[in-house]
Image (cartoon, helix red, strand yellow):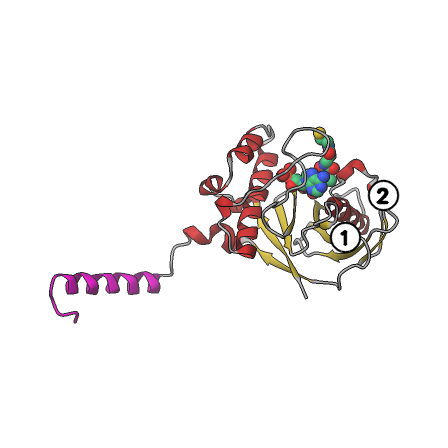
């Protein structure tokens, strides 16, 4: 059974070296985002997307071709796609939380696929209402329509898509996710029938993906490495490796 993964990150995990993973189009677009928090959210989403897809496919994060063609204009700010890999992806951010979903369902027919949505709880809105909104928005992100369809007209249960404006045949699986306190989130996998068997969705922290490269080894590991290097140096100089 195919598995999708939702990677969770916090804005504090963004590092300067992450920018080197992005391509020129991404860097140019991010530079146009005026609000600092929005820019950080989108930057972390773009970086995590690359790292998560690299993990999923074995490709190099900085060599992936990511396109974000907008269906309404020539801009590169639409739904992200990986034209060279059969994977479906979706990005969402709210407050400090950033989610990237990666799965095997690439939406080869151009409009089915994977969607994720995270929203920060709002004191003026019942949490159950927000959770439902997340399910509905995950669906419109999975189709790629976004807010071009009326989100409230998407009919969902907790685990199923039952009705989609203008596409009555469309069906889907839904998952309520665990974004942490103060947030609600959902993922959706949608397509025409027959829908694939319900895949497993795994949620993981992106901490190791985003900070792993620069993590300092534990003290014992550093000492063992120093001893090994010193031994090798003695051998190289012709001393016994005692
Ligand atoms: C997609 C959309 C529903 C996201 O709403 P949101 O709750 O504000 O934002 P989220 O954090 O959940 O998702 C944002 C991410 O969705 C992705 N996205 C953008 N357009 C998308 C689409 N049509 N379908 C699926 N995902 C989309 C992007 O990765 C974006 O992240 P980024 O901007 O950092 O690259 C909404 O922005 C939308 O409908 N946009 C399209 C509107 C449009 O086409 N306008 C015409 C512009 S010319």
Residue 239 vs residue 141: left or right?
A: left
Q: Main secondary structure of the magenta part?
A: helix
Is ligand 1 less than 8 Å from the beta carbon at label 2?
no
Q: Quadrant of residue 217?
A: bottom left
User: Which residue is the site of mark 2?
Assistant: 152
**Image location of residue 130, percent across then percent down:** 78, 47
Is residue 229 within the magenta segment?
yes
CA distance separating discs 2 and 1? 17 Å
Provide the secondary structure element on which disc 1 rests. Answer: strand
Say which residue appears at 74% left-offset and 54% top-offset: 189
Describe residue 25's horizontal placement relative to residue 224 as left or right.
Answer: right
Is residue 158 visible to the viewer in this orientation of the structure? no
- The magenta stretch spans which residues? 219-242
- Please say if 214 is above or below 24: below
User: Does label 2 or label 1 sit earlier along the sequence?
Assistant: 2
Q: Residue 161's spot in the image, x, y percent?
A: 82, 54
- Relative placement, left or right, of 210 versus 33 is left
Q: Quadrant of the N terminus?
A: bottom right
| Residue 46 rendering spot, x and y as whole percentages | 57, 42
| Residue at (26% x, 61% y) in the render | 226
Write down the quadrant of residue 157 in the picture. Answer: bottom right
Which mark identifies residue 190?
Answer: 1
User: What secondary structure is marked by label 2?
Assistant: helix
| In-front residue for pair 143/211 | 143
- Asked if residue 149 lies left or right of residue 86, the reply is right
Assess disc 2: are there few (<14), some (14-19) or many (≥20) residues with their C-alpha within 10 Å of its C-alpha: few
Q: Is residue 83 visible?
A: yes
């Amino acid at each position: 059974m195919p598995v999708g993964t939702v990677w969770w990150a916090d804005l504090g995990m963004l590092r300067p070296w992450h920018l080197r993973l992005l391509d020129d189009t991404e860097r140019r677009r991010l530079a146009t985002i005026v609000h600092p928090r929005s820019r950080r959210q989108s930057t972390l989403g773009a970086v995590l997307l690359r790292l998560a897809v690299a993990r999923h496919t074995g490709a190099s994060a900085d060599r992936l071709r990511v396109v974000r063609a907008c269906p309404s204009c020539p801009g590169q700010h639409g739904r992200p796609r990986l034209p060279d890999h059969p994977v479906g992806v979706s990005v969402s951010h709210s407050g400090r939380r950033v989610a990237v979903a990666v799965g095997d369902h690439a939406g080869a027919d151009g409009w089915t696929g994977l969607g994720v949505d995270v929203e920060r709880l709002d004191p003026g809105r019942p949490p159950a209402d927000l959770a439902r909104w997340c399910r509905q928005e995950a669906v419109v992100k999975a189709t790629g329509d976004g807010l071009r369809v009326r989100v409230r007209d998407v009919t969902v249960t907790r685990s199923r898509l039952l009705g989609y404006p203008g596409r009555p045949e469309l069906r889907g699986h839904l998952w309520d996710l665990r974004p942490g306190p103060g947030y609600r989130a959902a993922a959706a996998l949608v397509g025409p029938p027959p829908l694939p068997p319900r895949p497993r969705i795994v949620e993981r922290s992106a901490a190791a993906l985003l900070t792993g490269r620069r993590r300092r080894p534990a003290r014992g590991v550093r000492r063992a490495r120093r001893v090994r290097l010193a031994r090798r140096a003695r051998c190289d100089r012709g001393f016994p490796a005692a």
